[in-house]
Amino acid sequence: MTGLAEARAAIIAAGQRLDHLGWVPATAGNISVRLGDGSIAITRSGGHKGFLSDDGVIRVGLDGVPLREGDRPSAETGLHCGIYRRFAAAGAVLHGHSVPVTVLSRRLAGSIRLEGYELLKAFPGLATHQAAVALPVFENDQDIARLQDAVETRWAEEATIPPGYLLRGHGIYVWGADMPQALMRLEAVEFMLRCELEARRLS
């Protein structure tokens, strides 16, 4: 059962890690953890993720509504909540804005296929590099409820759902059972996307 203090510490540490790697420039990105009481700890809107304090992490319900008057969560809180509602095992969600994610999602439609990489083992059910994963790419939409509807429609059509997706020209969402797993998956995906971007540059 994750408490608010533990979640805040995990989110602050994750923000520093993502900032160090250059994946959350300026005020970009957001980070959340599911709490033991079913609510969500998530980064406050507008803060730099590399310099978070306890006050930079607030609580919202599974509907995305702040649980304390005056708190303002990220505009994309609804996407975090959609992941938690759909996947009972999801305990942490990361959203970043790296260069490979931004560039590739602008150039590729439908999905980005990752195949033959050793780090595919970061995905559930894959024990070898002899596998492939298609990461969905969704059109970015400022109407978060409508965007979440599009995501859920895609999930309903897929037999196997990878723990991540991209928004065109915007960023990536990755989740895991806890923060260490979410970070591991994000780092694996970012490495593979950097490889894809470099391969396209060389060709």
Image (tube, rainbow, N blue to C red):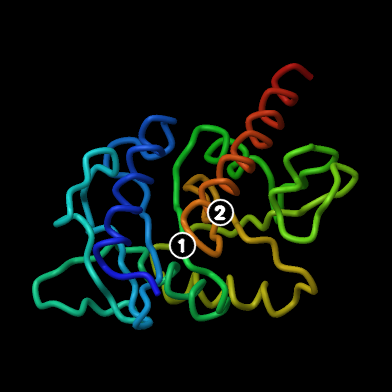
Question: Does residue 195 appear to the left or right of 35 in the view shown?
Answer: right
Q: Toward the viewer: 145 or 23?
A: 23
- Give the quadrant of the C terminus: top right
Q: Name the image quarter holding residue 56.
A: bottom left
The amino acid pointed to by label 2 is Gln
Disc 2 + disc 1, Cβ < 8 Å: yes
The residue under label 2 is: 181
Count how many numbered circles sit on residues in the image.
2
Q: Return the residue found at the far front.
A: 1
The amino acid pointed to by label 1 is Ala
| Mark 2 vs mark 1, CA separation in Å | 8 Å
The residue under label 1 is: 92
Q: Toward the viewer: 193 or 43?
A: 43
Q: Name the image quarter holding residue 191.
A: top right
Question: Does residue 80 appear to the left or right of 58 in the view shown?
Answer: right
Q: Name the residue rendered at 34%, 83% in the picture.
A: 37
Question: Does residue 160 appear to the left or right of 10 in the view shown?
Answer: right
Q: Residues within 10 Å of mark 2 (few under 14, many from 20)?
A: some
User: Picture coordinates of residue 33 (x, y %)?
Assistant: 39, 64
Counting residues from the N terminus, which is met first, the one under dot 2 or under dot 1?
1
| Secondary structure category for the residue under label 2 | helix
User: Picture coordinates of residue 174 (x, y %)?
Assistant: 55, 55
Q: Name the residue rendered at 90%, 44% in the picture.
A: 130
Question: Does residue 91 appear to the left or right of 106 in the view shown?
Answer: left
